[in-house]
């Protein structure tokens, strides 16, 4: 039987009870930051190898002109990524010992971790600015 795309019924009855929540956002962000951390670690490793081989000139463009702002923004994002991933990893450790599964508390902790990860990021980058 051909599917009628104008049919208002959902494909699954679960779509009627599914709701977006902070724990889900935190889980997705945890995966995204994990990937970002790997990419950032590889980029920093390549940068360090180039520095070790005396290729400062070939990467100097990263720290000059408008590209300096792009590089700084990327490093700030990487700092937030590491902070969030570490804090959310702690939350997962508590889950591993059976703590923190209550839905309201879990959503609150998820949102708090997303916000609190800004603190070490800001402390590090504002400290560098002075």
Image (cartoon, grey):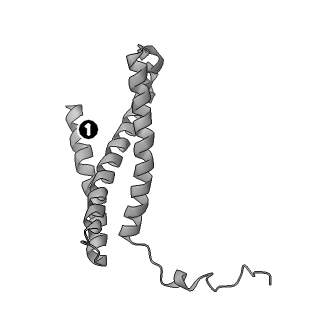
Query: Which type of secondary structure does the marked residue at label 1 adopt?
Result: helix
Across and down, in percent, residue 28 comes to: 43, 61
Vertical comparison of 98 with 50: above or below: below
Residue position marked by numbered label 1 in the rendering: 125
Q: In terms of image quadrants, where is residue 24?
A: bottom left
- Taking the image as shown, residue 124 lies to the left or right of residue 40, namely left
Q: Position of residue 88 (x, y in %)?
A: 30, 58
Name the residue located 45 percent from the left edge and 48 percent from the top edge: 35
Q: Residue drawn at (27%, 62%), measured in percent from left and top?
A: 93
Q: Quadrant of residue 126?
A: top left
Residue that appears at 44% across and 53% down: 32
> Above or below — where is 89 with respect to 65?
below
Q: Residue 125's x, y, as percent?
A: 26, 38
Q: Is residue 63 visible?
A: no
Q: Give the vertical position of 116 relative to 15 (above or below).
A: above
Query: Is residue 50 found left or right of 80 in the rendered image?
Result: right
């Amino acid at each position: 039987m051909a599917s009628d795309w104008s049919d208002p019924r959902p494909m699954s009855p679960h779509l009627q009870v599914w709701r977006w929540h902070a724990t889900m956002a935190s889980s997705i962000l945890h995966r995204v930051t994990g990937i970002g951390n790997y990419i950032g670690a590889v980029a920093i490793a390549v940068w360090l190898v180039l520095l070790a081989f005396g290729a400062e000139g070939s990467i100097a463009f990263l720290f000059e002109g408008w590209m300096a702002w792009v590089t700084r923004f990327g490093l700030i994002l990487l700092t937030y990524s590491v902070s969030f991933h570490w804090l959310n990893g702690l939350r997962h450790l508590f889950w591993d010992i059976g703590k923190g599964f209550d839905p309201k508390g879990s959503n609150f902790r998820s949102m708090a971790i997303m916000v609190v990860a800004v603190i070490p990021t800001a402390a590090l980058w504002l400290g560098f600015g002075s």
